Amino acid sequence: MTNSMTRTARLIFTLTLLGTSTLLGHSALAQSPLFQPLYEVLSHPRCMNCHTITDFPRQGDERRRHDQLVVRGADNHGAPTLQCSACHQDNNVADGAVPGAPHWGLAPLSMGWEGLSASQLCQVLKDKSKNGDRSLADLLKHMSEDDLVLWAWTPGGNRTTPPLSQPAFVEAVQAWVNAGGPC
């Protein structure tokens, strides 16, 4: 092969690789490594069971439909005849069978995260029309201080906890917020 043909072949090979990586790896390239630890926590059953896109809550690590056929209700706190607070109090019950935290209920449907990739969840999380009109600073406060969010690390019973400790999660959220919330 001549030098000219070799250079042309290398150029074609390089352009092919760049085109392939752009087509196949776009979502991976768009995803910020700062968001990955948040995604690992937010996609855990302790979060996803209430951040569902269904008209009912889920429960357990297998994310089964809630027992007693509980439904979302108009205000995300159950049907008028069976509100979440009928069973879920401000704290876990002593034997851990029924979890509890203040203002127990489902996240609004706009905050449903099922089926979202890390990049999509990041975008939805930052979208004020879908996140309860929260800024990045508000999201940090919510994820570090809200009693219902904090419950995920003390769920009682045999429930698993998210893959990061609560302080490590807050640190990861803070780093993500400080960087401007990259996705």
Image: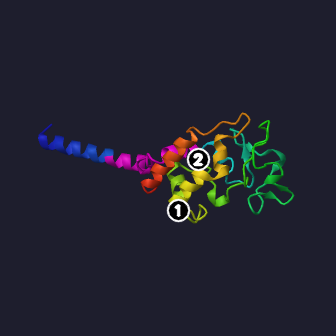
**Residue 94 at what x, y percent from top left?**
79, 38
Q: Work out whether residue 135 or residue 130 is closer to the camera in this orientation and state it.
A: 135
Read off the magenta span: 18-41
How many tags in the picture? 2
The kind of residue on which mark 1 rests is Ser
Relative to residue 25, is residue 109 drawn left or right? Answer: right
Main secondary structure found in the magenta portion: helix
**x then y, percent, for residue 29:** 40, 48
Image position of 172 (left or right of 3): right
Asked if labels 2 and 1 touch by Cβ distance under 8 angstroms, the answer is no
Type of the residue with mark 2: Leu
Residue at 12%, 39% in the rendered image: 2
Q: Does any portion of residue 147 appear in the rendered image?
A: yes
Indicate whether 169 appears above or below 75.
Answer: above
Query: Which residue is disc 2 drawn over?
Result: 42
- Residue occupying the far right of the picture: 81
Q: Secondary structure at mark 2?
A: helix
Which residue is labeled 1 in the image? 135
Please say if 1 is above or below 103. Answer: above
32 magenta-colored? yes
Note whether residue 124 is visible.
no
Identify the element where label 1 is drawn. loop
